[in-house]
Image: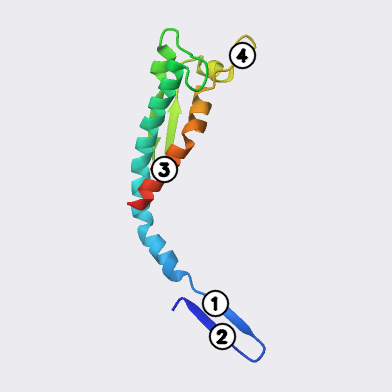
C-alpha cells in the first residue's frame, strides 16, 4: 500500500511510501547506466562529425579550414558517462576563442549549443530501453 491515512482526534496525516518507486528505479539503474554508456559512444561520434562539418563548411561559425589539419584533428571519445570532443593541434584554442589578431570561430561551443536537443534525445532513448 503506497498511501497510508491516519486519523486521530486532532490530526490527519498522509504518509507517502515511495520505497516501491525507488526499488523500481534501483532495479533499472544498472541497465540504464549501461545503456547511457553505450549512447555516449554514439554522442561522441555524432558530435565529432557535427564539429568537423562546422569547421569544414562554416556551419556554426566562419570556416576554419586551411590545410585541413584542424578539422582532421577533431576526435570524439566516450568514457563511462562522458563524451569528449577535442583537438590536439596547438592552435585549436586560438581558433575557438580568438586572439588579439583573429576573431573567434567557436565551432565546438556553437555545435554543442545547436546539437544539445539531439544529445538529450540520445540519453532519453537509452532510458527507454
Residue at (41% x, 61% y) in the render:
25
How far apart marks 3 and 4 lie (CA) works out to 35 Å
Sequence-wise first label, 1 or 3:
1
Query: Quick one: label 3, few (<14), some, or many (20+) residues within 10 Å?
Result: some
Q: Which mark is residue 15?
A: 1
Residue 117: horizontal and vertical position, in percent?
47, 39
**Which residue: 51% across, 81% down?**
4
Q: Which of 57 and 70 is in front in this view?
A: 57
Q: Give the mark, 2 or 4, whose residue is nearer the N terminus.
A: 2
Q: Which mark is residue 121?
A: 3
Residue name at image x 48 percent, y 69 percent = 18
Residue 27 location (% of width, % of height): 36, 61
- Residue closest to the far right: 10
State which mark lies toward you, 3 or 4. 3
Residue that badge 2 annotates: 6
Q: Is residue 6 above or below residue 37?
A: below
Q: Residues within 10 Å of mark 2 (few under 14, many from 20)?
A: few
Asked if labels 1 and 2 touch by Cβ distance under 8 angstroms, the answer is yes
The mark closer to the camera, 2 or 3, is 3
Dot 4 or dot 1: first in sequence order is: 1
First-in-chain label (3 vs 4):
4
Q: Is residue 100 left or right of residue 106?
A: right
Mark 1 and mark 3 residues within 8 Å of each other at the beta carbon: no
Alpha-carbon neighbours of circle 4 within 10 Å: few (<14), some, or many (≥20)?
Answer: few
Residue assigned mark 4: 99
Amino acid at each position: 500500500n503506497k498511501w497510508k491515512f491516519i486519523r486521530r482526534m486532532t490530526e490527519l496525516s498522509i504518509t507517502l511510501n515511495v520505497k516501491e518507486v525507488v526499488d523500481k528505479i534501483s532495479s533499472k539503474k544498472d541497465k540504464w547506466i549501461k545503456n547511457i554508456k553505450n549512447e555516449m559512444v554514439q554522442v561522441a561520434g555524432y558530435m565529432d562529425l557535427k564539429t568537423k562539418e562546422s569547421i569544414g563548411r562554416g556551419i556554426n561559425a566562419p570556416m576554419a579550414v586551411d590545410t585541413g589539419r584542424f578539422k582532421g584533428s577533431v576526435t570524439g571519445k566516450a568514457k563511462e558517462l562522458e563524451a569528449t570532443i577535442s583537438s590536439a593541434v596547438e592552435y585549436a584554442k586560438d581558433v575557438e576563442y580568438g586572439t588579439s589578431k583573429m576573431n573567434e570561430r567557436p565551432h565546438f561551443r556553437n555545435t554543442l549549443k545547436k546539437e544539445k536537443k539531439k544529445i538529450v534525445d540520445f540519453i532519453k532513448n537509452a532510458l527507454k530501453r
